[in-house]
């Protein structure tokens, strides 16, 4: 198998520079609301990066590092358009294109030999994206998805890196274990406690020990580290069995009030409930909550609930998890809500059903959805949303692309990649 992983460099900031040529060569950051003291950097240009500006910096902090920093607002519709245009270029070489967020994709070019070998195709893609769209892309070439992604991270920006069967031990083994796909900060800390700090050390570790220590994902991570991943690159329109449905967001500023947390959890739960209904998966019996604080530490918890597909019940379960379990006392940057344990329409009758409690709520939510479909999402909002003008404009259901979450609920490349404003969760690759 010949797999490419393409990663658009500093994507949001680069799109801004292509839209406004006067910004080229200057330190640029795409940020949340610049009027908010705690608005954050979502993406930055190479010039800003040289001053030490990082994704996730608070705006005032970024400006202190780089006094000449040019702050640009988020233009998500433009980023989606460019993402689609880039994928049109990928489609010239293969129809096996698996999106991994708005700015990353895997491509299977095993049967694309008419265009040359993997490195040749990667160079052609890099040149076409640069010439036609004025964007740069780093491309990793390897024999599986995990190593292709690792390769794309090794040289940035605007580069092609090959990791194959002959050199992967030399290239991959010395890398920090945190560089491996799905190894977040929490997992890296756990591995460090038992002396595993590199991918090579993880590959050499006993599989049974890893499974006992980390659960089923321990064995999976061992497979990844050894280069034994055989997961295929999915067609971008391919349907597959969903184990979970969810959504997450990184907000435009730090959030430290519980009422704001609750409001955002309702925004996310609206999206999750709608997607659950669209997928025809019935009701879910488990709600998962993911939280990222303003120091980029991530946490995740879950709880069993009565089988439900209702926004209100999903949101209240997520909020109760937050109140019960989040004790970090730090402001929140990111939130995610996911549901799992689907009954696919086959369910057992409960006392709540007999009392008509669930059906009454379901009819109300169905009526709301029908009005929104006819007149637009923003025409009918929950009262809780009117306490925050930004919440009123958030239709997270309609503005998100599929991207798997990491083992710890973390978004891949969260330290130096783009902060997606929101992402879908799935369990595993």
Image (cartoon, helix red, strand yellow):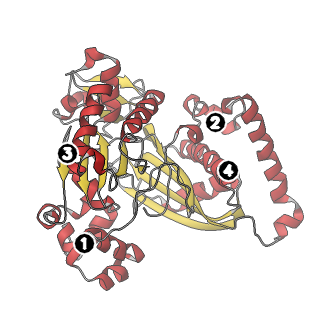
Residue located 25% across and 27% down the image: 63
Q: Is residue 390 left or right of residue 125?
A: right
Where is residue 46 shown, x and y percent of the image? 20, 32
Which quadrant of the structure image shows residue 338? bottom right
Rendered-image quadrant of the C terminus: bottom left
Q: Which residue is mark 1?
A: 226
User: Mark 3 against mark 4, which lies toward the viewer?
Assistant: 3
Q: In the rendered image of this protein, does residue 214 appear above or below residue 310?
A: below
* Nearest to N terminus: mark 3 or mark 1: 3
Q: Is residue 147 left or right of residue 286?
A: left
Q: Which residue is mark 4?
A: 278
User: How far apart are the alpha carbons under marks 2 and 1?
Assistant: 48 Å
Q: Which residue is mark 2?
A: 385
Using the image as rendered, state which of residue 148 and residue 301 is in the foreground: 148
User: How far apart are the alpha carbons under marks 4 and 1?
Assistant: 38 Å
* Nearest to N terminus: mark 4 or mark 2: 4
Where is residue 348 shown, x and y percent of the image? 79, 73
* Nearest to N terminus: mark 4 or mark 1: 1
* Nearest to N terminus: mark 3 or mark 2: 3
Cβ–Cβ under 8 Å for marks 3 and 2: no
Q: Which residue is mark 3?
A: 160
User: Mark 3 against mark 1, which lies toward the viewer?
Assistant: 3
* Nearest to N terminus: mark 3 or mark 4: 3
Using the image as rendered, state which of residue 196 and residue 115 is in the foreground: 115
Q: In the rendered image of this protein, does residue 107 appear above or below residue 64?
A: below
Residue located 32% across and 66% down the image: 187
User: How far apart are the alpha carbons under marks 3 and 1?
Assistant: 22 Å
């Amino acid at each position: 198998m010949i797999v490419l992983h393409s990663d658009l460099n500093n994507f949001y900031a680069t799109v801004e520079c292509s839209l406004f040529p006067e910004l080229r060569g200057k330190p640029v950051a795409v940020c949340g609301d610049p009027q908010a003291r705690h608005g954050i950097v979502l993406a930055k240009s190479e010039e800003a990066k040289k001053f030490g500006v990082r994704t996730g910096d608070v705006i005032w902090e970024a400006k202190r590092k780089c006094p000449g920093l040019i702050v640009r607002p988020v233009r998500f519709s433009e980023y989606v358009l460019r993402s689609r245009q880039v994928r049109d270029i990928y489609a010239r070489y293969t129809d096996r294109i698996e999106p991994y967020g708005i700015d990353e994709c895997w491509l299977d070019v095993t049967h694309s030999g008419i265009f040359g070998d993997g490195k040749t195709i990667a160079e052609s893609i890099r040149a076409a994206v640069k010439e036609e769209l004025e964007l740069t892309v780093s491309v990793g070439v390897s024999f599986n998805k995990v190593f292709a992604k690792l390769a794309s991270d090794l040289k940035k920006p605007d580069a092609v890196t090959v990791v194959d069967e002959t050199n992967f031990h030399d290239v991959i083994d010395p890398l920090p274990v945190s560089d491996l796909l799905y190894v977040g900060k929490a997992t890296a800390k756990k591995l460090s406690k038992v002396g595993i700090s590199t991918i090579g050390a993880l590959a050499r570790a006993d599989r049974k020990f890893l499974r006992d220590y980390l659960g089923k994902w321990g064995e999976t991570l061992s497979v990844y580290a050894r280069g034994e991943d055989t997961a295929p690159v999915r067609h971008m329109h391919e349907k597959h069995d969903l184990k979970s449905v969810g959504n997450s967001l990184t907000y435009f500023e730090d959030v430290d009030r519980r009422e704001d947390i609750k409001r955002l959890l309702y925004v996310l739960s609206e999206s999750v409930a709608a997607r659950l209904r669209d997928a025809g998966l019935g009701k879910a019996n488990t709600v998962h909550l993911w939280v990222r604080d303003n120091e980029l530490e991530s946490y995740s918890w879950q709880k069993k609930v009565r089988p439900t597909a209702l926004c209100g019940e999903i949101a209240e379960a997520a909020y109760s998890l937050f109140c019960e379990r989040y004790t970090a006392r730090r402001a929140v940057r990111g939130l995610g809500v996911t549901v799992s344990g689907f009954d696919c329409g086959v369910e057992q009758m409960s006392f709540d059903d007999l009392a008509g409690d669930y059906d009454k709520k379901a009819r109300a939510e169905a009526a709301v959805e029908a009005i929104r479909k006819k007149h637009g999402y923003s025409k009918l909002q929950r009262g809780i949303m009117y306490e925050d003008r930004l919440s009123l404009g958030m239709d997270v259901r309609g503005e998100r692309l599929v991207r798997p979450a990491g083992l710890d609920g973390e978004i891949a490349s969260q330290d130096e990649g783009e902060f997606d404003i929101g992402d879908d969760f799935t369990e595993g690759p």
